[in-house]
């Protein structure tokens, strides 16, 4: 499937680092259920998010590249919205507002190519599979949020931290119905397999087979390069893997869940890993960070790749 997205033009675009962990550990914000989108509902929260995203744009500007900005809506889906006292109408408004917020930043920075991505998260926990949905159930669940992004004019939707193939398939189905390009980002455990136990290669292949290859591309996020570099050295549909938002910490998902202090890892070491991975994935289109990384990591990654 051919998707005309600026980040697929041959240059590595930057994305954010670990927004939520940055807000919690560096700025002292409490984010119930790891949800950042409620910050858009207060002037102070909007200023904080503006400063963060603007800093990402500045790093991209200095590198002479573009930025793929994800709306802070990883937890803005129906089940999580219910836990956060956001019924359907309020969630719809929050998701549309998040897209408009990033569109405003794009308009304020016309010299940088900014791509606005509506960000989805898993229905359940981002680290364990929990109760599995069929692709049809997943499509029905995520369609409301995807429709909000489509209505607001997002350039694409991206789902981060997918733990099993059926939910990923459903999200691609729903995005296709809404007419939006979609990116699927899986996470892996320390052995390089999905939390479901399936291999990354099988997951990508089966999502493509079930959806006629509709996804624009695939990504990896929320895992240290040590957890997946060996996998990428073996056979797989790696031409479809075009984005990376890795952790700097080598901790497992279980250890990260239990951690009370932030493990930032090593910025230079992470950046060097990105350079190695680009040699394996020359089509790498989007680079950012995940849990525990911050703007300093992103600058190091940008320097290594540009």
Image (cartoon, helix red, strand yellow):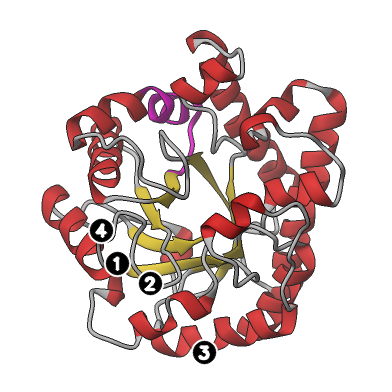
The first of marks 2 and 4 along the sequence is 4
The first of marks 4 and 3 along the sequence is 4
Question: 237 above or below 234?
Answer: above
Q: Residue at x 45, y 90 (%)?
A: 279
Identify the mark at residue 236; answer none if there is no mark.
none
Question: 195 above or below 168?
Answer: below
* Residue 206 figure quarter: bottom left
3D distance between C-alphas at marks 1 and 3: 19 Å
Foreground disc of the pair 2, 3:
2
Q: Secondary structure at mark 1?
A: helix
Q: Is the residue under label 1 in contact with that under label 2 (CB below 8 Å)?
A: yes
Q: Is residue 67 visible?
A: no
From the image, tell me which residue sits under label 4: 2
Q: Secondary structure at mark 2?
A: loop
The first of marks 1 and 3 along the sequence is 1
Residue interval drawn in magenta: 144-156
- In magenta stretch: residue 146: yes
3D distance between C-alphas at marks 2 and 4: 29 Å
Q: Residue at x 46, y 30 (%)?
A: 149
Q: Residues within 10 Å of mark 4 (few under 14, many from 20)?
A: few
3D distance between C-alphas at marks 4 and 3: 28 Å
Question: 201 above or below 78?
Answer: below
Q: Position of residue 251 (x, y in %)?
A: 60, 67
Q: Residues within 10 Å of mark 2 (few under 14, many from 20)?
A: many
From the image, tell me which residue sits under label 1: 200
3D distance between C-alphas at marks 2 and 3: 17 Å
Q: Position of residue 233 (x, y in %)?
A: 34, 88
From the image, tell me which residue sits under label 3: 276
Say how many tags the image has.
Answer: 4
The first of marks 2 and 3 along the sequence is 2
């Amino acid at each position: 499937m051919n998707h005309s997205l600026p980040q697929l033009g041959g240059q590595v675009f930057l994305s954010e680092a670990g927004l939520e962990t940055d807000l919690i550990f560096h700025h002292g914000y409490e984010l119930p259920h790891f949800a950042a989108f409620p910050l858009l509902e207060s002037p102070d929260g909007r200023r904080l998010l503006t400063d963060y995203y603007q800093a990402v744009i500045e790093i991209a500007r200095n590198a002479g590249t573009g930025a793929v900005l994800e709306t802070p809506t990883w937890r803005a889906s129906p089940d999580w919205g219910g836990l956060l006292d956001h019924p359907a109408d309020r969630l719809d408004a929050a998701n549309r507002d998040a897209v408009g917020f990033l569109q405003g930043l794009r308009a304020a920075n016309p010299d940088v190519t900014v791509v606005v991505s509506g960000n989805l998260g898993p229905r359940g926990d981002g680290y364990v599979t929990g109760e599995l949905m069929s692709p049809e159930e997943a499509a029905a669940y995520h369609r409301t949020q995807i429709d909000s992004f489509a209505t607001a004019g997002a350039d694409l939707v991206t789902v981060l931290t997918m733990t099993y193939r059926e939910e990923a398939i459903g999200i691609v189905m729903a995005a296709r119905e809404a007419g939006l390009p979609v990116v699927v980002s899986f996470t892996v455990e320390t052995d390089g397999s999905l939390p479901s136990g399936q291999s990354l290669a099988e997951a990508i292949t089966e999502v493509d087979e079930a959806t006629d290859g509709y996804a624009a591309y695939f990504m990896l996020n929320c895992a240290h390069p040590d957890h997946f570099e060996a996998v990428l050295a073996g056979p797989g549909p790696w031409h479809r893997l075009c984005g990376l938002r890795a952790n700097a910490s080598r901790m497992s998902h279980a250890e990260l869940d239990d951690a009370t202090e932030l493990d930032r890892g090593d910025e230079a070491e992470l950046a060097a890993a990105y350079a190695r991975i680009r040699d394996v994935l020359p089509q790498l289109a989007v680079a950012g960070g995940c849990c525990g990384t911050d703007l300093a990591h992103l600058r190091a990654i940008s320097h290594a790749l540009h």
